[in-house]
Image (tube, rainbow, N blue to C red):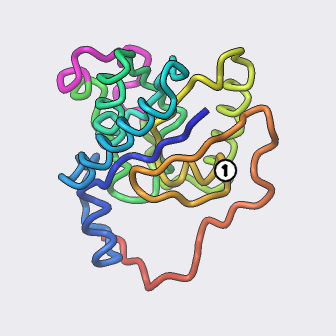
Amino acid sequence: MILLRHGQSEFNLHFTATRRDPGIADPKLTELGQQQAEAAAEALAAGEAGRIGRILCSPYTRALQTAAPLARRLNLPVLVTPTVRERYAFSCDIGSPCTALGLAWPHLDFSHLEEVWWPPIEEPDDQIEARATLFRGEMAALPDWQDTVVVSHWGFILAMTGERVNNGEWRRCDPTEPGPQEIVWRQAHPTVVKP
């Protein structure tokens, strides 16, 4: 399967420049992020022609916006899958309520989500790793897991692969193989200041 990180969001833009949480809940894609989503859709549709049969996507707006161009190109539905959401650690990980998502994306099915589907507090490392392990097992049980694109986030992709990916990048992942042996969640960075 292919794990695609969403395009640049308004949060990513400000956080990258300042290393401070800008306080943007469920941010949208920037213009660059929209371009990254279109470029990923074009590359995946051309390079995986006829092989992609399923698009799974996190319920965050930035992921839904990233999945939309690929879904249009391939004429596939987007299956909203909260298991692949981002690790809750910053303001961008406060989602939009299920009702608001349904109004913004009326053609998508959100009926299986709780109204507030993101965690109330920061998610520990072991919890996102357990969520990735659960998802790996669910995907491995599908006979056609190879046909799946998962539109997700930095933290979830790191938990699945042990690799850091930039906005709009993707990695292949075989869910029948063991997950990463060691995941380094924190690297030396300038101080991160939360509001």
Name the residue at 45% across, 59% down.
166
- Image quadrant assignment for residue 61: top left
Nearer to the camera, 149 or 128: 149
| Along the line of sight, the residue nearer the viewer: 155 or 70 | 70
SS for tag 1?
Answer: helix
Position of residue 61 in the picture relative to residue 76 (left or right): left
- 50 or 94: which is nearer to us? 50
Q: Main secondary structure of the magenta part?
A: loop
Residue 15 found in image quarter: bottom left
Q: Residue at x 68, y 52 (%)?
A: 126
For the point 66% across and 17% down, the residue is 144
Q: Quadrant of residue 118?
A: top left
Whether residue 179 sits left or right of residue 86 in the image: it is right
The percent coordinates of residue 64 (x first, y second) are 33, 34
Mark 1 residue type: Thr
Q: Quadrant of the N terminus?
A: top right
Question: Is 26 on the left or on the right of 86, as rendered?
Answer: left
- Per the rendered image, the range of residues in magenta is 102-117
Q: Position of residue 175 (x, y in %)?
A: 72, 34
Which residue in the structure is indicated by mark 1? 161
Q: Position of residue 176 (x, y in %)?
A: 78, 32
